[in-house]
Structure formats: C-alpha cells, structure tokens
Image (spheres, rainbow, N blue to C red):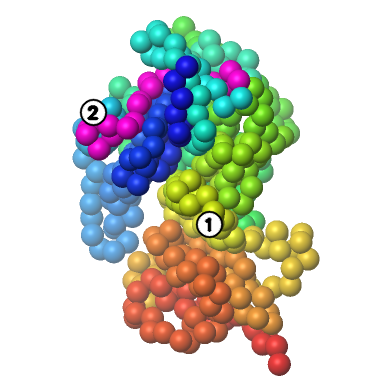
Amino acid sequence: MTHYDLVIIGTGSGNTIVNRRFADRKVAIVERGTFGGTCLNVGCIPTKMFVHAADVAATPSESSRYGVDEELLGVRWPDVRDRIFGRIDPIAAGGSEYRHHNPDNANVTVYDGTGRFTGFKELTVDNKDGSTSVFSADQFVLATGSRPIVPPIPGLEETGFHTSNTVMRLEELPRRLAIIGSGFVAAEFAHVFASFGVEVTIVARSSVLLRHEDGELATAYTKIAQELYDVRLNHETIRVERRDDGSILVGMLNPDGADELIVDELLVAVGREPNSDLLNLAATGVEVDDEARVVVDAYQQTTVDGIYALGDVTTPHQLKHVANHEARVVKHNLLNPDDRIESDHRFVPHAVFSAPQIASVGLTEEEAKERGIPYVKAVQRYADIAYGWAMEDTTGFAKILADPKTGQIIGAHIMGPQAPTVIQPIIQAMSFELDAYAMARGQYWIHPAMPELIENALLQLDLHPEG
C-alpha cells in the first residue's frame, strides 16, 4: 500500500496549503469534482459576476429620478453566462493542470475521484477512470466543502430542478422562475434573474426573508423584496410536478390554505450541508456533531491526531474567507507542530449581494438580548449623509451595537449601497479592539464618502465610559 506524509481531500481552500515548503513531503491531493472547489466554480466568484451584470441591467429602472432617462434594450443571457464561465473554467482547468503536471508538484500525486476512509488513516479512492486506489498517510486535511440541500418535496426529483450548482449555466432565461428558500442564495439569485427581466417568485417557509440577519434589517429587506418580486411568506412547498406543456406546478400550503404557482424553472435554495457523509469518517475515528460537521479543536485538528479539517465541512460559517483563514492556520500547524496557532472566529463578517446589499458582523440585537449582554445602539440612514443624499437612497441604514461602558463594538449591520465594503472599518475596529469613540474621533473620515455612514453612527452611540 502506498503511504504518504500528507493527504488533502478537496481542492478549494485546501489546495492553497501545499506550496514549496512541503517539497520534502510526499503529498496526495484528492478531488471528486471540479478543481478549485465551490467558490471558484459554483459559488462566490461566478455569482458575484452575475450580480454585477444584474446591477448594470437594473440601473435604467431608477435612473429617471436623477434626470437621466435610460432604457434596457435587452439581456444577451448566453453572452453574460459565457463571459463569466469563459474566464472561470480556464482557471479551474489551469489549477488542475498545475497540480498534475507542473515540476513544482513533482512530490504531489493527484487523484481525480471520491475518497472515503476504509481504515484508520487509510483512504480508498474511486477514481473517475473506473480504477480504485488505496493508500495511507500520517496526516490528512479534510477540506471537502458542502453541497446544496435537496429537501424531500414530493415530485421534486421527477420534475427536475436547479440548485446554485446548475442554475448559472441555463441554456436560456426562463420567463418565470420560482425560488424555494429565503436565505442569501435566494436573495442574490432573485436580484440577478429579476434584473434580467425574469418574473421571480420567492417561496419562503419563514415569516421574513434573511431571517438569520438582525431582525430590523431582515424586516426592512423583506419589505423591499416584496416590492421587487412575488414573495410568498409562510408558504410550505408540499409538491411539484411537470405539466404537459413543460411548465412546473408548485403546490404550497400557507396559514390561509392551499396555494399554487406555475413557472418555467425551479431553483431550490434552502441551504447547504457538509460533505462529511461521503468520507466514512467512522472508519478512521473522526467525530461529527449533530449537524454532520466535523468536530475540530482551536487548532483545526479533528478528534484524531494528525487529521485536520477546514471550511464548510466543519464550520457553521459557510464562507470562503473563513475557509481561507482556516487553511492558513492548518498550513502553519502542519509546518510547525511544536508552535501551533489557533483559529480566530470571534468576528466573522458576511455579506449578501442582493438588492440592496447587506453586510453584518458580530451580534444581532436579538442575540445580545438573549444572552443578557448590555448594549447601546445607533442607527444611521444613508439618506442623512451627503453621498446617500446624492444617491437619494431612501431605504439604506447602518446599525451599530456597542458596550455602553467600554465602547467596544459588539455588532454592526448594514443594508444599502456597497454595504460589504462600508462595513470593513467596523471589522477592523472589532478585531483590534478599537473602541467606538476612538474610532470616530481618532481619524479623518473622507467627506463626502459613504464611510461617513459609519462615522455618524458611531457618534450617535450613547456611551458611558467606566471611571
């Protein structure tokens, strides 16, 4: 049996670990899908390229308020799609080619197939060419990511449907699209397809969209979404079926009774689940939690010495920047076993590239209340800063929560133009323990730029310093 020093399963963030510092080690990399993982191929990068095209397509709908009359003449969907994947697919292929054949990887063997443990630190790979490989290793990195959840809706499999993995490669734009789900994937694709002229219906079991966001923000976003799309809240999808004319019937239940919807395409966007079940982890003694996430310690090591895990297979933060951070920690700990470092998950930000955009970090107001954490809050609207006034933004705002005595920021939530960029100074302040007063008063804020949204919110906080 072949024996390796290190085996990495998954080529998303896991692929960033092996560099020239591992040249003295015998390494194997296992990939069951497309090289580069979720973010590059079916996640954050292509989706945001679609979002940018959608933002461009949406500008005529509101340009007249500025005295500029624009018209959307058409959306060439194949051109939009092919421009995006014409750039992404070669990157994935290039990454595979590099690992397979570049002299830099003379010590690396790549297995294109699905790996599963068949013994203690023993992996069996069912290769795509039909062969099977069995090998062992001293160390493993589990970086197998996650996949879209497919709910057990009667008729779903027979009818056919899309997930975020497939919907971006549609042959043509549908006239009508139903999106089952109410989270960030649903919000982003609703914006994309509606901006391209598709009639979008969001079918949500919950009473608000983006229900995991701060309650004030989720409520405000839901109200905006209801003006842009057909939003059906408190609707449980109970069946789907393909009709004789090729359209899809979606059957639902809501508090008022039964409801039906006819569409041309169906997107299921109800969340993602870790790929831990594909690994047969019990065979090597690695534990998973109640949500099938691989259990790791602060060093990203699993319950088995020498087996590490990172990214969606282990963290509830299904975010590329979290996986990248954890990959850096794992790389350091593999190279420096006597001087290991811990992951830092204190202030993990996230963003939703919807219409409008959303960004958040830290505690929501509801979480602060539930935990009994004292806080003061301030809300600053885009409309009341100079650049927001210029844009005539009427819905955007920033909400900041802080400790009333120390001034330390404990949460921030923004909805509006460029929210994922505007929130970055808050993330930096929280990470380096800069209090709200010092942050607001101790630096210049460019006028009239959008970060003034943060400055003004900080200045509104009713702080009572200790002593």
Q: Which residues are magenta?
A: 101-119
Q: Which residue is mark 1?
A: 339
Q: Which mark is residue 101?
A: 2
Describe residue 208's horizontal placement relative to residue 397 as left or right: right
Predominant SS along the magenta part: strand
Horizontal and vertical percent position of residue 356: 44, 54
Describe residue 381's horizontal placement relative to residue 42 as left or right: right
Residue found 52% across the figure and 42% down from its top: 310
Q: Secondary structure at mark 2?
A: helix
Badge count: 2
Q: Secondary structure at mark 1?
A: loop
Vertical relation: 147 (above or below) 18: above
Question: Which amino acid type is marked by label 1?
Answer: Asp
Residue found 38% across the figure and 67% down from its top: 392
- Between 80 and 110, the one lying in front of the other is 110
Horizontal and vertical percent position of residue 323: 48, 46
Residue 461 belongs to magenta span: no
Question: Which amino acid type is marked by label 2?
Answer: His
Vertical relation: 451 (above or below) 246: below
Q: Quadrant of the C terminus?
A: bottom right
Horizontal and vertical percent position of residue 94: 24, 33
Badge 2: how crowded within 10 Å, few (<14), some, or many (20+)?
A: few
